[in-house]
Image: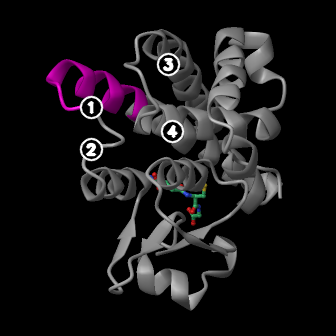
Amino acid sequence: MRIFYSPASPFAAKVRMAASHCGLELESVDTDTKAEPADLLASNPLGKIPAVVLDDGTALYDSRTICDYFDKLTGGQLVPQTLEDWTKVKLAEATADGIGDALILVLYEERYRPADRRHQPWVDKQMRKADRGLEVLEGQIEDLPEGPTTAHFAVAGLLGWMSFRFAGKLEAERPALAAWLQSFAETFPAYAELGPRQA
Ligand SMILES: N[C@@H](CCC(=O)N[C@@H](CS)C(=O)NCC(=O)O)C(=O)O
């Protein structure tokens, strides 16, 4: 299997960590989404990473789809089956992914829009989404079933990425999440290699 990824991406880190946990080998292709490379677009019409191409050529995209595929492929190694635990995991995963979506939009506003066309109220709205999400996530991670699950990988991807894109925010505002990431990295040593990294 091949994955289009970039070292910084929280969603790609989530998928690469999940694959490693499942014992799946991925050939990682460092991909610049800005350049809209043809092989990425052929695998994901949305032009986003992560996208995974299976050995038979089938392309999968969106980290949730890919992780759920890995879970099914490996007999349920990522998502618990009881309704109660499934709900906790899927909700925490959705919170983490949603915070990532909001914060990425904040960054893209700076990265892609000329300064005189930026709309601060819209940026503030995305930050409020992220801040509400982080508050809820703090409670959700305390109640996660034993992992690692897709939620653990989504949260670790998000927090690892925030630690350099929004440096100091977690420590100042959400120390419990900063501490969670530290203990995740200790219990999942592959985080050192597969967690998000500033390119
Ligand atoms: N919902 C998607 C989000 C993926 C995403 O936003 N990826 C970013 C990089 S972290 C991307 O590819 N951005 C380029 C773009 O939006 O064109 C997932 O979970 O995989």
Residue at disc 4, secondary structure: helix
Circle 4 or circle 2, nearest the eye? 2
Q: Position of residue 27 (x, y in %)?
A: 58, 74
Q: CA distance from mark 4 to mark 2?
A: 17 Å
Labels 1 and 2 touching (C-beta < 8 A): yes
Of the image marks 4 and 2, the number of the one nearer the N terminus: 2
- For label 3, the residue is 137
Tell me whether the residue at label 3 lies in contact with that at label 4, contact meaning CB atoms closer than 8 angstroms: no
* Horizontal arrangement in the rendering, residue 80 relative to residue 169 (left or right): left
Side of 158 where 112 appears, left or right: right
- What is the crowding at mark 4: few (fewer than 14 residues within 10 Å), some, or many (at least 20)? many
Kindly identify which residue carries mark 4. Answer: 154
- Residue at image mark 1: 80
For the residue carrying disc 2, how many other residues have a C-alpha within 10 Å: few (<14), some (14-19), or many (20+)?
A: some
Asked whether 143 or 106 is in front, the reply is 143
- Residue range in magenta is 80-93
Q: CA distance from mark 1 to mark 3?
A: 19 Å
Tell me: 113 left or right of 14: right
Crowding around mark 3 (Cα neighbors within 10 Å: few <14, some 14 to 19, many 20+) is: many
Q: Position of residue 128 (x, y in %)?
A: 57, 23
Question: Residue under circle 2?
Answer: 76
Residue in front for this viewpoint, 80 or 172: 80
